[in-house]
């Protein structure tokens, strides 16, 4: 069989088991999307603070633009001519917000995760990752020369055992975790990992705050801020593409690590920098982040309402955040529920293997501060009806 027909066969199989993915062109209207003339509340976006859908913010930003500063391309890598003054401004602001020595920004969170670990982890390194870390972290680990093992999701005892057993065998161990897990919506216990690290001189912690940056913590810095352990974490990473409504990934770290990454991190070195326009928008929003407390509080309230409603119905979600999953089991079941909810005006998508383990297909409701309490009550009601086949 030639390669193309084997691709075709595989696609036919994916369709049969309900795992075929496809693109869905959508029009956007604030917290709603429009498809085939149907207007739906968008529960599949990572615009957690509602900043991306906020026209007032965009208007205020547009006021600052002139033909001189409206630069749509950096035209080269940061190391060539792409290091505009605004890059340093964003990085200094970020480092200051966290009270860390330095920060470095990347083209995306994906670049960040596929680039940092291979740069930092040599062949004398063990990377220990939570079983549920994001695909981009797995890709970064695969690209690195490090030895690699995983611990069961959130299982601190198993992590401790691995550290105890392995710390003497390696020059360094990097523990890689997320702070809020995107598919279960649960939180890591960062202080417990920091406690373990203290027992050893060669353990470093890498935390990806992709779903928590902007959302958690008094100033929106993430779970590390909420759990009071910013200073015990070696590498705090995040993305601007989710709650911050912009684009790019970042790390806050020591000055030495920043300089090392500038010299060794391939996706940083070999890719054109983000356009100055995007840096400006990021800076514009970062400056306001600490004052977005009302949005964070409203989002927390909405999330509590949805979690409670689903809990009362006997579906106990694992989540304690703004990401609320509803387990369906088989992919086809998840797809059916999603279709029915879309019909009822809620844009939710099934999450299927390989994104989640086989047999744990689910719906994933991503809430946003731009939603109203009434809409979430209505959503909860509709979820229960669809689930009960009403
Ligand atoms: C979305 C995500 C990324 C990728 O970030 P982008 O800026 O979208 O490339 C990385 N890590 C985690 C945990 C994510 O959820």
Image: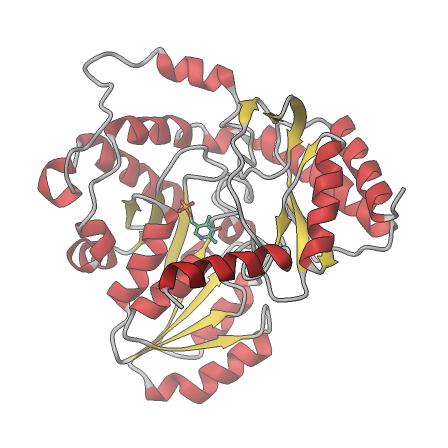
Foreground: 208 or 16?
16
Question: Which residue sits furthest left?
Answer: 80
Q: For residue 346, which quarter of the picture?
A: top right
Query: Where 63 sits versus 11, above or below?
Result: above
At 25% from the left edge and 79% from the top edge, which residue is drawn?
Answer: 123
| Quadrant containing the C terminus in the rendered view | top right
Residue 347 pos. (x, y %): 65, 35
Query: Where 352 sits versus 278, above or below?
Result: below
At 51% from the left edge and 56% from the top edge, which residue is drawn?
Answer: 11
- Residue 126 in view (yes/no): yes
Query: Where 286 sits versus 69, above or below?
Result: below
Residue 33 pos. (x, y %): 60, 27
Query: Where 99 sits versus 343, above or below?
Result: below
| Quadrant containing the N terminus in the rendered view | bottom left
At 67% from the left edge and 57% from the top edge, which residue is drawn?
Answer: 331
Residue 208 pos. (x, y %): 44, 55
At 15% from the left edge and 37% from the top edge, which residue is drawn?
Answer: 82
Foreground: 233 or 151?
151
Question: Which residue sits furthest front?
Answer: 1
How many numbered badges does the structure rendering display? 0
Q: For residue 43, which quarter of the picture?
A: top right
């Amino acid at each position: 069989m030639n390669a193309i027909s084997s691709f075709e066969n595989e696609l036919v199989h994916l369709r049969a088991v309900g795992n075929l993915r496809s693109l869905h062109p959508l029009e956007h209207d604030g917290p709603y999307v429009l498809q085939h003339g149907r207007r739906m509340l968008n529960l599949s976006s990572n615009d957690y603070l509602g900043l991306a859908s906020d026209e007032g913010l965009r208007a205020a930003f547009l006021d600052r633009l002139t033909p001189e500063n409206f630069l749509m391309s950096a035209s080269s890598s940061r190391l060539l001519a792409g290091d505009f003054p605004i890059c340093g401004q964003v990085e200094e602001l970020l480092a200051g917000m966290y009270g860390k020595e330095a920060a470095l920004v990347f083209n995306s969170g994906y670049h960040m995760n596929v680039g940092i670990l291979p740069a930092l982890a040599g062949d004398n390194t063990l990377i220990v990752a939570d079983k549920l870390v994001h695909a981009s972290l797995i890709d970064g680990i695969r690209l690195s020369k490090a030895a690699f093992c995983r611990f069961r999701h959130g299982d601190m005892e198993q992590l401790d055992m691995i550290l105890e057993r392995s710390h003497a065998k390696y020059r360094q161990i990097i523990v890689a975790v997320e702070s809020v897990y995107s598919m279960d919506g649960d939180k890591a216990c960062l202080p417990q990992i920091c406690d373990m690290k203290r027992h050893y001189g060669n353990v470093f912690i890498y935390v990806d705050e992709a779903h928590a940056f902007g959302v958690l913590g008094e100033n929106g810095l993430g779970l590390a801020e909420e759990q009071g352990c910013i200073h015990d974490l070696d590498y705090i990473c995040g993305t601007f593409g989710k709650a911050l409504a912009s684009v790019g990934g970042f790390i806050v770290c020591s000055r030495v690590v920043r300089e090392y990454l500038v010299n060794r991190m391939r996706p940083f070195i070999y890719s054109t920098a983000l356009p100055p326009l995007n840096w400006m928008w990021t800076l514009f929003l970062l400056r306001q982040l600490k004052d977005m407390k009302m949005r964070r509080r409203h989002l927390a309230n909405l999330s509590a309402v949805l979690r409670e409603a689903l809990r009362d119905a006997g579906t106990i979600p694992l989540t304690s955040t703004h990401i609320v999953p509803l387990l369906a089991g088989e992919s086809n079941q998840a797809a059916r529920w999603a279709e029915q909810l879309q019909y009822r005006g809620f844009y939710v998508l099934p999450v299927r293997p390989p994104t989640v383990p086989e047999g744990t297909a689910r719906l994933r409701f991503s809430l946003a501060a731009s939603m109203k309490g009434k809409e979430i009550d209505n959503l909860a009601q509709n979820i229960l009806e669809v689930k009960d086949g009403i």
